[in-house]
Image (cartoon, grey):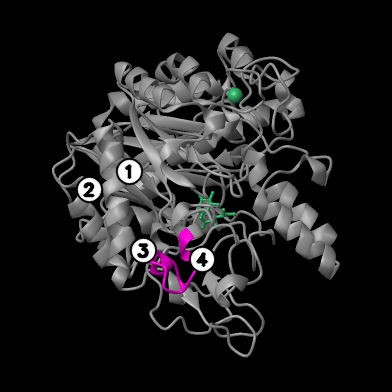
Amino acid sequence: MMETHNCWWKERVFYEIYPRSFQDSNGDGIGDLRGIISRLDYLQWLGVGAVWLCPIYDSPNADMGYDIRNYESVMAEFGTMEDFDELVTQLHRRDIKLVMDLVVNHTSDEHPWFLEARTAKDNPYRDYYIWRDGKDGREPNNWASFFTPSAWSYDETTAQWYLHLFSGKQPDLNWENPEPRQEIYGMMNRWLDRGVDGFRMDVISLLAKHPQLPDGTGSGYVFSPEYFAFQPRLHDYLREMRRACFDGRDCMCVGETSFVTTQNAGSVVDDGRELDMLFQFDVMDMDSGETKWDARPFDLMRFKQIISAWQAAIGWNTLFWGNHDQPRLVSRFGCTRTETLRRRSATCLATAMYLLRGTPFLYQGEEIGMTNCPFPDISELRDVESLNLLRQAAESGRMDWAWRGVRSKGRDNAHTPMQWDAPPNGGFTGGAPWIMVNPNVQEINVAAALRDPDSVLHYYRALLALRREQDVLRYGDFSLLLHEHPQVFAYARTFEGQQIRIYCNFTDRDAPLPEAFCKEKVLLTNVNYEKTDVLLPYEAAVVMA
Ligand code: TEU
Ligand code: CA
């Protein structure tokens, strides 16, 4: 097991900010850097130790900043480089670290590299991207993209196709070419020199593609991660990046490693010394069927297996229930039937996840139990993924299926503005918000939660404080308890002769416990109870053994 102590990114809780939806400061309806600065006291009060900032680089926003036009300037809507420097200063003044989201699998098609590349086959930037001739007038292979049917777009000027695993406005960089690699490392070093404390690397597991770009097996367009995720060359690139950017610095790099498994994760974070942490999506995929739009019910036994497997697989995990790509936690895995159950399930889920071994990553609004948004109409949606899905579904007559999917899983659920205060716009903006505010803003907002000692918010704050106070919760080993219990997720953390046990009822019914726990030893709970041999619906209890 790795040396664990005195490492800032293991000691702190991260908070993900989606800047467009966090806080507007100038009334244009779009969140911005000055807005974030105005809310830093809140993050400090909550007990956040590091911020993951979603992309703030200049971008045409085909995918809300995940399509970068200029890596070294700030998106005009978000502010200026001076605002950014001020944000870094103000965060550090509060002892909060800043980790930037960075997208280097692809750029925007408006990035100067791509604008050059597409002009001619012999342009010096041509090989920054992945170009191929078509086959019989069709795409070079049958790969499907995440956002569009085909992963290829045809470019008239040079009569070739370019690869894009995401939208056509996000051409994939060619990592086999050392030139873009060096340019990227230079750029990363300049951000680190500016004072940022690390990066969250977008879809980092996709950098290397199979050199032959083979067809996937199946008919039509086939989603073929076996040829674009975790290819052998990925490890060379990650090691090179580490040497070029991180060695000798006290920074942290966490990778979004889509398609990682418990088998190959260790090669990236433990022995390889490539990334410090990784995001795996086994929990996020739990409620997906054939696609993420096909719903499958939450299965507690499967959850126990996934968590146990990951806690054992690598020395240090990331702990999260959502992010800017995911629907809202309490609507997805909790229960919003009554206000009591919303609060209980929100706090129960937080307890279950964030006391595991690893670093917690909260997503903005989760700490007040924000819910999915009942979007009344397509015109209220903004996300490229949802809009493309609905367009395709309209063509194939699957509109009901797609609309149901988008309402429950669409990414816009996570993008409705942060609910700070009362209506109309929840304190997010004085103008017209770029995306609708959730109609439940009257009941669910930070100001109301601050006034209410039983709020989800106060519980989150206490939970984070408990993690900070107890070494055993940060560094203890994990072991699953009550393996076969059909309602309860329970585990123990053990460190230097101390043990803390966590009990969470994942159902809306009472759950009997085989053994009562001792009321006097409860460190944190989300109920007021009499009995300790039964857990109430969505009860969570953290108990010193
Ligand atoms: O997401 C990568 C990814 O794998 C997505 O397909 C994710 O599974 C999907 O959004 C779920 O619907 C990253 C970013 O987090 C996402 O916001 C970007 O759109 C994407 O990369 C492209 O940069
Ligand atoms: Ca603004």
Q: How far apart are marks 3 and 4 (CA)?
A: 40 Å
Q: Distance between the residues labelled 4 and 2?
A: 29 Å
Type of the residue with mark 2: Cys
Type of the residue with mark 1: Arg
Residue 369 is left or right of residue 251, and the answer is right
**Residue on which the image places disc 1:** 357
Residue 506 is left or right of residue 476, and the answer is right
Q: What stretch is highlighted in magenta?
A: 116-130
Label 2 with label 1: CB-CB less than 8 Å: no
Q: Tell me what residue is drawn at x 60 percent, y 60 percent.
A: 167
In the rendered view, tell whether residue 533 sits above or below residue 404. Answer: above
Q: Distance between the residues labelled 1 and 3?
A: 15 Å
Label number found at residue 262? 3
Q: Tell me what residue is drawn at x 25 percent, y 52 percent.
A: 315
Residue 542 is left or right of residue 178, and the answer is right
**Residue on which the image places disc 4:** 118
The nearer-to-camera label among 4 and 1 is 4
Q: How far apart are marks 3 and 2 (CA)?
A: 27 Å
Horizontal and vertical percent position of residue 208: 37, 69
Horizontal and vertical percent position of residue 227: 44, 76
Give the prevailing secondary structure in the magenta stretch.
Answer: loop
Residue 258 forms part of the magenta stretch: no
The nearer-to-camera label among 3 and 4 is 4
